[in-house]
Image (spheres, helix red, strand yellow):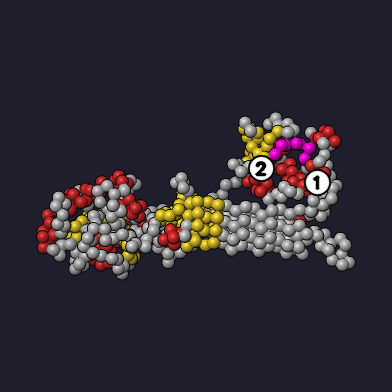
């Protein structure tokens, strides 16, 4: 059974942030100790990191569910909760991270390349961090932020310079074994190779990698055989080498027809038209195969192919082939854009960006934005003072002015968030600065005030 997996659906759950602590210092001879609640720790991330020693996604096929730990809650005496450790997923170089819908999120190439699949939630602030001249002893703390939960598709495309393509039993794996230190499983029946084999070849001062692509037969691009599973590994290769079996005993097959069939499958798969091609006529150690190779070589050269007669068994012709492949690889590397590594993408906000949007829907007014949605998730709605603090923040953000400008009236339905939105009846009486906090700790008098009791009628 093959132990190679090149595509898997991963279910990632990051860790929630720890809750902040609402605590007041109570020590002898310190009657006005003040708030001393610590902040909660952030939850752990789920991170994909390229590890050169990993060559398959098999580990995630066996365990597709990965979850990070939650952050620890804060405590009194200014003790902050510990941040949870990140869950590191070691993936092979060439791994693409996609959404289930096919959108590419990251293309991880090179040792150490990193992508955060799911981010942990931020820890909630304790009441010591929330204290201000206006709110000297907050009777509340912020909750930890819920973490991201994402389903992504990990897809591996081998990073190789040269791809050997051809029918099963054409000798691709034997060529890789003869030219490199790779030792793939080899036999004389179709589909011996169930996984792509990768070998490192040295030709003079040039070092490059060669991969054989198994399972290409007529209809491979539509899913027949194993071809569709492994055609993706051709995409990253700079050079394609057709390995043609000149000693086949299958009726109706010859090197020219094999070449045309494989080229048709590559064309149907698409995206490979610009790759330079070469042809290796294999198994010339068999007398009849050598005669056939000498017959078809001029025909292939007329088509513009660079043709080599080789034998993977006796190594005849492999040196010339290796240097020719090295020349093609060097040309492809010279033509490729220089690899400057992953650049951070900066997206500065517009000067008039309010940080949120309000849209009118049949159900009411929907508010979307990173900050208001995060603030709502971190609010303890069982604590009136915490709700009042949320109202202060939303008002300072400009949300109430925006709602009034869109025609919202007291009692209008406002939804903050998406499908899991917090829904409430909006009253403009809860605005920053409209009424001082004068209730006991844990309460906010603005929540109980009538609209006509507030200065200016709450407008």
- Which residue sits at x=65%, y=45%? 373
What quarter of the picture does the N terminus occupy? bottom left
- Position in image of residue 344 (x %, y %): 54, 53
Looking at the image, residue 314 sits to the left or right of residue 5; the answer is left
Is there any visible trace of residue 332 in the rendered image? no
- Position in image of residue 456 (x %, y %): 83, 34
Between 82 and 332, the residue placed more toward the observer is 82
What quarter of the picture does the C terminus occupy? top right
- Position in image of residue 285 (x %, y %): 15, 65
Is there any visible trace of residue 230 in the rendered image? yes
Tag shown at residue 3? none
Quarter occupied by residue 197: bottom left
Residue 264 against residue 407 in the figure, above or below: below
Q: What element carries label 2?
A: strand
- Position in image of residue 108 (x %, y %): 46, 56
Quarter occupied by residue 400: top right
Between 102 and 240, the residue placed more toward the observer is 102
Disc 2 crowd, CA 10 A, few/some/many (<14, 14-19, 20+): some
- Which residue sits at x=17%, y=53%? 255
- Which residue sits at x=84%, y=48%? 439
Q: Is mark 1 on a helix, strand or loop?
A: loop
Residue that sits furthest to the front in the current view:
382
User: Which residues make up the magenta segment?
Assistant: 424-430
Quarter occupied by residue 17: bottom right
Residue 8 against residue 429 in the figure, above or below: below
Tag shown at residue 444? 1
The residue labelled by disc 2 is 422
Whole-angstrom CA distance, mark 1 to mark 2, is 20 Å
- Which residue sits at x=26%, y=46%? 264
Looking at the image, residue 193 sits to the left or right of residue 373; the answer is left
235 drawn magenta: no
- Considering only order in the chain, which callout, 2 or 1, is on the residue closer to the N terminus? 2
């Amino acid at each position: 059974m093959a132990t190679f997996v090149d595509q898997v659906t991963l279910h990632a759950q990051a860790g929630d942030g720890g809750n902040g602590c609402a605590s007041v210092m109570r020590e002898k001879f310190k009657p006005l100790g003040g708030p001393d609640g610590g902040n909660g720790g952030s939850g752990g991330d789920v991170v994909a990191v390229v590890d050169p020693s990993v060559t398959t996604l098999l580990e995630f096929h066996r365990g597709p569910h990965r979850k990070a730990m939650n952050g620890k809650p804060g405590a009194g005496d200014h003790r902050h909760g510990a941040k949870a450790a990140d869950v590191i997923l070691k993936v092979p170089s060439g791994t693409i991270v996609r959404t289930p819908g096919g959108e590419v999120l990251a293309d991880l190439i090179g040792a150490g390349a990193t992508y955060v699949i799911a981010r942990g939630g931020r820890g909630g602030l304790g009441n010591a961090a929330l204290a201000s001249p206006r709110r000297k002893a907050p009777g509340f703390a912020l909750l930890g932020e819920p973490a991201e939960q994402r389903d992504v598709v990990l897809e591996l495309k081998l990073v190789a310079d040269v791809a050997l393509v051809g029918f099963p039993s054409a000798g691709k794996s034997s060529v890789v074994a003869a030219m490199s230190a790779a030792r793939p499983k080899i036999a004389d029946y179709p589909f011996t190779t169930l996984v792509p084999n990768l070998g490192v070849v040295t030709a003079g001062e040039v070092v490059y990698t060669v991969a054989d692509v198994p399972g290409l037969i007529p209809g491979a691009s539509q899913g027949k055989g194993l071809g569709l599973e492994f055609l993706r590994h051709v995409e990253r290769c700079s050079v394609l080498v057709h390995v043609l079996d000149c000693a086949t005993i299958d009726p109706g097959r010859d090197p020219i027809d094999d070449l045309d069939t494989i080229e048709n499958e590559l064309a149907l798969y698409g995206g490979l038209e610009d790759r330079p091609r070469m042809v290796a006529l294999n198994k010339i150690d068999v007398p009849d195969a050598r005669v056939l190779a000498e017959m078809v070589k001029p025909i292939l050269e007329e088509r513009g192919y660079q043709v080599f007669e080789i034998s993977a068994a006796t190594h005849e012709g492999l040196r010339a082939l290796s240097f020719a492949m090295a020349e093609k690889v060097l040309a492809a590397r010279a033509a490729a854009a220089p690899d400057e590594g992953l650049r951070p993408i900066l997206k500065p906000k517009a000067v008039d960006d309010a940080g949120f949007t309000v849209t009118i829907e049949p159900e009411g007014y929907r508010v979307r934005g990173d900050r208001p949605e995060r603030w709502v998730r971190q609010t303890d709605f069982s604590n009136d003072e915490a709700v009042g603090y949320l109202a202060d923040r939303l008002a300072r953000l400009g949300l109430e002015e925006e709602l009034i400008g869109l025609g919202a009236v007291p009692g209008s339905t406002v939804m903050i968030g998406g499908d899991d939105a917090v829904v409430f009846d909006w009253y403009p009486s809860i605005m920053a600065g409209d009424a001082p906090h004068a209730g006991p700790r844990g309460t906010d008098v603005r929540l109980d005030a009538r609209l006509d009791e507030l200065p200016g009628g709450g407008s």
